[in-house]
Image (cartoon, rainbow, N blue to C red):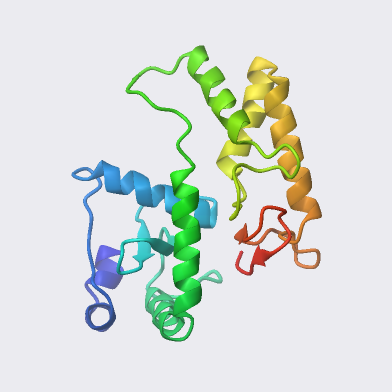
Amino acid sequence: MAHESFENSATAEFMNSHFINIKVDREERPDLDAIYMQAVVAMTGQGGWPMTVFLTPEGRPFYGGTYFPPAPRYGMPSFIQLMQGIVNAWETKRSEIIQSSGDITKHLQRTAVLTGQEDVLSPSMFGKATEALAKDFDHERGGFGGAPKFPPSMTLEYLLQSFVLHKDSRALHMAETTLKMMAYGGMYDQIGGGFARYSTDVNWLVPHFEK
């Protein structure tokens, strides 16, 4: 993107006219990279580099992704089209964006389940991770913590792998309950398939209408 978009004069002019642009070296600031990567994964279900994140003036993420092409392709908007949409949304739906950024920030504050500085993964660490997830698990409605509830794709993958490898029935219960409640709730698109970005309530009933 540095060559395709950032060095393009029209794109650069638009960026400088509407945004405060900060390029982060993830080798120099792995802490910032980790925080905003978690945000992108929460918003899109996947992460990677290059990473583009749009923030409020307070530094809270509200939209992000990885690679955006210089011209529309494969159903993706161009990078400048994306920025135009962001500018328009900020001007017309600012309160909703601020609310969304607050929801994402609260979600990020709940994501860390392991602490410590151990460099080598051990079986006990997996047990601790599952226990930490179990404490935050909503046994009645599935998912973890309160509203907003994001589809916890990476957590579910971990739980299913934990059941396969360690025969941990708690892990299977948490994964199955969460997936069932997501499928039964309003987040699931009954017509087009797929799931909304997240649920604004604890019951998975009120979706945030993005995929």
Image coords of residue 184 (percent x, y): 81, 53
Q: Quadrant of the C terminus?
A: bottom right
Residue that appears at 70% across and 59% down: 194
Image coords of residue 174 (percent x, y): 70, 33
Q: How many labels does the image show?
A: 0
In the rendered image, which quarter is residue 200 located in? bottom right
113, above or below 72, in the image? above
204, above or below 81, in the image? above
Residue that appears at 68% across and 19% down: 168
Residue that appears at 41% across and 85% down: 91
Whether residue 31 is visible to the viewer of this picture, yes or no, is yes
Judge from the rendering whether residue 209 lies leftward or rightward of residue 39; answer left or right: right
Whether residue 47 is visible to the viewer of this picture, yes or no, is no
Q: Quadrant of the N terminus?
A: bottom left
164, above or below 156, in the image? above
Residue that appears at 24% across and 83% down: 17
Image coords of residue 51 (percent x, y): 36, 56
- Foreground residue, 107 or 15? 107
Judge from the rendering whether residue 109 lies leftward or rightward of residue 191; answer left or right: left
Residue at the far left: name it.
28
Image coords of residue 149 (percent x, y): 61, 52
